[in-house]
Amino acid sequence: MRLIIEPDYLTLSRWAGDYVASKIKAANPTPEKPFVLGCPTGSSPLGLYKRLIELYKKGDISFENVVTFNMDEYVGLPEDHPESYHSFMWKNFFSHINIKKENVHILNGNAENLEEECANYEKAIAAAGGIDLFMGGVGQDGHIAFNEPGSSLTSVTRKKELTSDTIVANSRFFDYDLEKVPRVALTVGVGTVMAAREVLIVCNGHNKARALKHAVEEGISQMWTISALQLHPHAIIVCDETATDELKVGTYKYFKDIEKNNL
Ligand code: GLP
């Protein structure tokens, strides 16, 4: 696993956006062989999306042959609700770039048969040739997508109950009213993320410091699902200085040293 430590949120977002753009460009995608990008929601990736939009507007990158799969979606929240992940993605990313609507995949949390919806999502990912690069954030309790503590590290797309911690954390998007936060979500599994050819996680702020410690220094555990990335051959976490607060000084120095030329 690579750990890139940037001074602050702005620089980490630029690093992540530039990295994703370089990967898309290097792949030189075509309609027959598109680049398949996994997309997260949450506040952490906002800067990364902003950077990608900037690069698109400058003419540095095109999303014409990019296919996306989102990580997760709430169950039972109308698609046009301002806090649905459908709304989030169009508002913060898709409506600002030249992605084709038919290339966007987001789980339908209002499907009649949720199990079938999840199984079809895995099939659609496979049919697209698998995910080239899965971008992600991390929850304070170390969850990736909605793979809460205790999730199987080989899990695939399925329905998950949200923990009280996540409901409290996400209530900030629902007027701090716990009653308004959906209790259940559909999410790709840890195994789905692990099957991507590459994974890039953005992690910022002091409230993510424990999660980062478990991701980087502690053992692989279902209680910190992000830690599964230690088994991934191409995983990168890009973080800011404050997220490193719980790392050992030696760990911090080690990653600063080996990444010092990778600006
Ligand atoms: C939610 C999302 C995750 C995200 C996490 C952290 O639980 N399902 O994908 O990583 O929140 O969100 P934030 O980036 O807002 O801290």
Image (cartoon, rainbow, N blue to C red):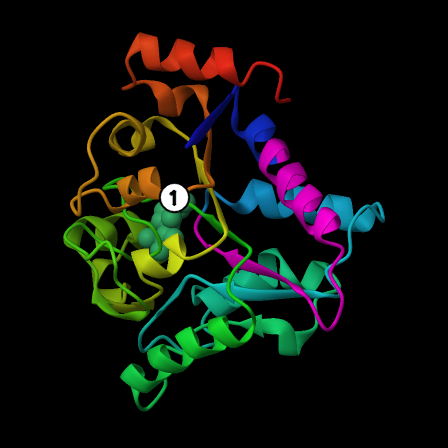
Q: Nearer the viewer, residue 251 or 204?
A: 251
Label 1 crowd (10 A; few <14 / some 14-19 / many >=20): some
Magenta-drawn segment: 14-42
Q: Is residue 183 visible?
A: no
Q: Position of residue 159 (x, y in %)?
A: 25, 72
Q: Quadrant of residue 250?
A: top left
In the picture of the structure, the residue carrying the numbered disc 1 is 232
Using the rendered image of the protein, determine whether residue 12 is visible from the camera's viewpoint: yes
Tell how many labels. Answer: 1
In this rendering, is residue 168 above or below 115? above
**Farthest right residue?**
59
| Residue at (30% x, 66% y) in the render | 156
Picture residue at 33% right of the left edge, 50% below the top: 144
Expressed as whole percent of the image width and height from the top left, the position of residue 106 reads 48, 71
Image-quadrant location for residue 174: bottom left
Residue at image coords 36%, 21%: 244
Outermost front residue:
233
Q: Is residue 28 magenta?
A: yes
Q: Residue 202 versus residue 207: which sits nearer the camera?
A: 202
Residue 137: x and y in percent read 41, 45
Q: In terms of depth relative to the viewer, which is nearer, 106 or 82?
A: 106
Amino acid type at circle 1 is: His
**In the image, is residue 55 above or below residue 88?**
above
Q: Secondary structure at mark 1?
A: loop
Q: Is residue 60 left or right of residue 182?
A: right
From the viewer's perspective, is 23 left or right of 71? right
Expressed as whole percent of the image width and height from the top left, the position of residue 187 reads 33, 65
Left or right: 233 with respect to 225?
A: right
